Amino acid sequence: MPQTFNVGARSIFVTITAWVFITLAAVTCVSALLQNASIAAWMGPVAGDVQPLPLLTGLLMGYLPWLVGAGLGVSLATLAAAIGLLLRLDWARRVFIGLLAFAIVANLLGLWLQQEVLQSVVQSTISRAPLPPAAADLFGGFVTATRAMAVAVTLAACALLGWIIRRLMSPAVRQEFA
């Protein structure tokens, strides 16, 4: 039996996806603007009062304003693509798929940074106050659970983004954008 599509029929999936990402992108844009302002204030004359984690010193701190600015750019692009998705513009669907693929790659590459930041936090904590053996074992268990959960949440988020990409590439959804 041939499958027929109604041209112009709006699926709930696309509408909900667009509104969720409009909301997330708007919140992220505001957050990035606030972060840029706080980084500018932090790197000003009172920067000597604040001691960052060892990993955030040096090379990474030099690139922090650039990274936050890049995040703002991606958030603005996501906001524009999500609005276009809500309006059922085909270019927006394609850009949105590309941004989701970029987010998957960035999350998978970010797994390394997650583990490095956690290791830096653990080392700075242990170097300040040596723990008794029983507490060290418990602390090590929490660290292991935190690492495993971070990996699991990242992989689950990547799988969800992959599922959204697959749905946006389906013939029924593509027909909405025709």
Image (cartoon, rainbow, N blue to C red):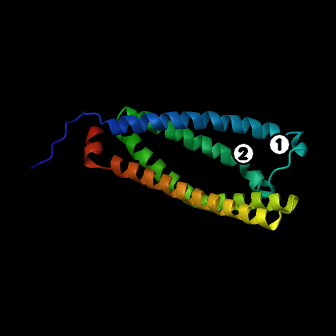
x then y, percent, for residue 162: 42, 54
x then y, percent, for residue 155: 51, 58
The image shows residue 23, relative to residue 156, as above or below, that is above
Helix, strand or loop at label 1? It is loop
Amino acid beneath label 1: Met
The residue nearer to you, when weighing 124 against 63, is 124
Dot 1: few (<14), some (14–19), or many (≥20) neighbours within 10 Å?
few
Q: Which residue is mark 2?
A: 65
Judge from the rendering whether residue 68 lies leftward or rightward of residue 17; answer left or right: right
Judge from the rendering whether residue 176 lies leftward or rightward of residue 33; answer left or right: left
Judge from the rendering whether residue 92 lies leftward or rightward of residue 60; answer left or right: left
x then y, percent, for residue 170: 29, 49
Residue, far left = 1
Amino acid beneath label 2: Pro
- Gap in Å between the C-alphas at discs 1 and 2? 10 Å
The image shows residue 144, relative to residue 31, as above or below, that is below
Residue at 42% from the left image edge and 36% from the top image edge: 18
The image shows residue 131, relative to residue 50, as above or below, that is below
Q: Which residue is mark 1?
A: 43
Residue at 54% from the left image edge and 37% from the top image edge: 25
